[in-house]
């Protein structure tokens, strides 16, 4: 009888360890990847016209449509964005990871986005590596305007706000000189660029007040006291807000993942920016 007690305690320890392990797997695989954080950020842009003060931009990034990030999940995100009543929605790349012919159709639900002005996008490295033409056509069919090295100008009475976008940097498709050549020389300008570390290049031009990026997923897994694992071109500005010269850089943690949907201490993100001129 006395010998059975140590064995019972051992079984109890094993059961407790297995329970903790299962709970941890549930958290990192099921709970946190679905637990979207809405970040509210107020930004003062020095060249912003008073007519655009209070302008609201919602940023989504790195949707990575796949068997986990289904059209139903994306539709729920769209519903949350519409509840925020944005003036503008921007999407900063990586709409799929692979197999765009299978997963790009899930992006059709983006048609339900209802900003006051527009929904604008740039492509990411995964889009460029798969079938950028198919992804762009899918987005445009859904009412999303893709800024491949181009810009658009939003108008208010006697005021303008310029939104520019570069095609993917990692894939070598960016043409910033073309963007600058066509961009008006006055008025606040915001750049959409998938890879955040491009901020060093864009800030050096002195033309942009703000760059919005994604790509890094914020590291996706962040263990205390350990360095984040980050993809190339996301080392310097991996998540959140930075000041790069006279330009603000903001890196969104994204919604999806490029592999197994696992997150720890790095929740997926929807960002809503309120712009101010003073």
Image (spheres, grey):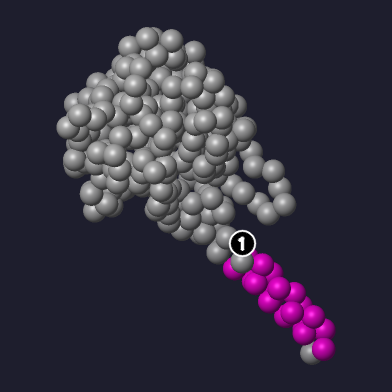
Which of the 4 image quarters holds residue 176? top left
Q: Position of residue 164 (x, y in %)?
A: 35, 23
Tell me which corner region of the image, top left, top right, bottom left or bottom right, holds residue 68. Answer: top left
Q: Is residue 121 above or below residue 251?
A: above
The answer to whether residue 40 of the structure is visible from this angle is yes
Within 10 Å of disc 1 (Cα), the crowding (few <14, some 14-19, many 20+) is few
Question: Which residue is rendered at x = 68% and y = 54% of the image?
Answer: 224
Viewer-closest of 168 and 161: 161
Q: Is residue 6 magenta?
A: yes
In this view of the protein, which residue sits in the foreground, 28 or 118? Answer: 118
Secondary structure mostly taken by the magenta-highlighted segment of the chain: helix
* Front-most of residues 231 and 30: 231
Is residue 47 located in the magenta-colored stretch of the structure?
A: no
Q: Residue furthest bottom?
A: 1
Q: Is residue 79 above or below residue 97?
A: below
Q: Is residue 174 positioned above or below 86 on the image? A: above
Residue 181 image position (x, y, % from top left):
37, 9
What is the x, y in percent for residue 215? 49, 33
User: The residue tagged with tag 1: helix, strand or loop?
Assistant: helix
> Residue 14: x and y, percent?
69, 69
User: Residue pushed farthest right?
Assistant: 3
- Look at the image and tell me in which quarter the N terminus lies: bottom right
Q: Residue at x 44, y 22 (%)?
A: 207
The residue under label 1 is 21
Residue at horizontal 64 percent and vertical 71 percent from the top: 15
Is there any visible trace of residue 66 in the rendered image?
Answer: no
Figure quadrant of residue 140: top left
The range drawn in magenta is 2-19
- Marker count (numbered): 1
Is 149 in front, or is 31? 149
């Amino acid at each position: 009888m006395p010998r059975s007690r140590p064995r019972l305690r051992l079984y109890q320890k094993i059961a407790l360890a297995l329970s903790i392990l299962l709970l941890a797997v549930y958290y990192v695989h099921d709970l946190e990847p679905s637990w979207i954080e809405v970040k509210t950020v107020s930004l003062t842009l020095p060249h912003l016209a008073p007519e655009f003060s209070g302008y609201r931009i919602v940023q989504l990034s790195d949707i990575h449509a796949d068997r986990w990030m289904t059209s139903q999940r994306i539709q729920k995100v769209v519903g949350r964005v519409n509840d925020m009543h944005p003036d503008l929605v921007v999407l900063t790349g990586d709409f799929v990871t692979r197999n765009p012919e299978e997963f790009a159709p899930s992006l059709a639900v983006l048609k339900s986005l209802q900003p006051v002005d527009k929904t604008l996008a740039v492509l990411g490295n995964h889009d460029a590596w798969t079938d950028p033409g198919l992804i762009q056509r899918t987005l445009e069919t859904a009412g999303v305007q893709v800024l491949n090295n181009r810009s658009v100008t939003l108008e208010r009475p006697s005021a303008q706000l310029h939104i520019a976008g570069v095609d993917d940097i990692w894939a070598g498709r960016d043409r910033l000189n073309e963007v600058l050549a066509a961009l008006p020389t006055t008025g606040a300008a915001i750049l959409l660029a998938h890879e955040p570390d491009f901020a060093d290049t864009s800030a050096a031009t002195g033309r942009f007040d703000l760059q919005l990026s994604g790509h890094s997923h914020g590291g996706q897994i962040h263990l205390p006291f350990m360095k984040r694992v980050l993809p190339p071109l996301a080392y310097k500005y991996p998540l959140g807000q930075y000041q790069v010269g006279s330009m603000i850089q903001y890196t969104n943690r994204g919604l999806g993942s490029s592999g197994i949907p696992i997150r720890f201490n790095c929740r997926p993100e929807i960002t809503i920016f309120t712009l101010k001129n003073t």
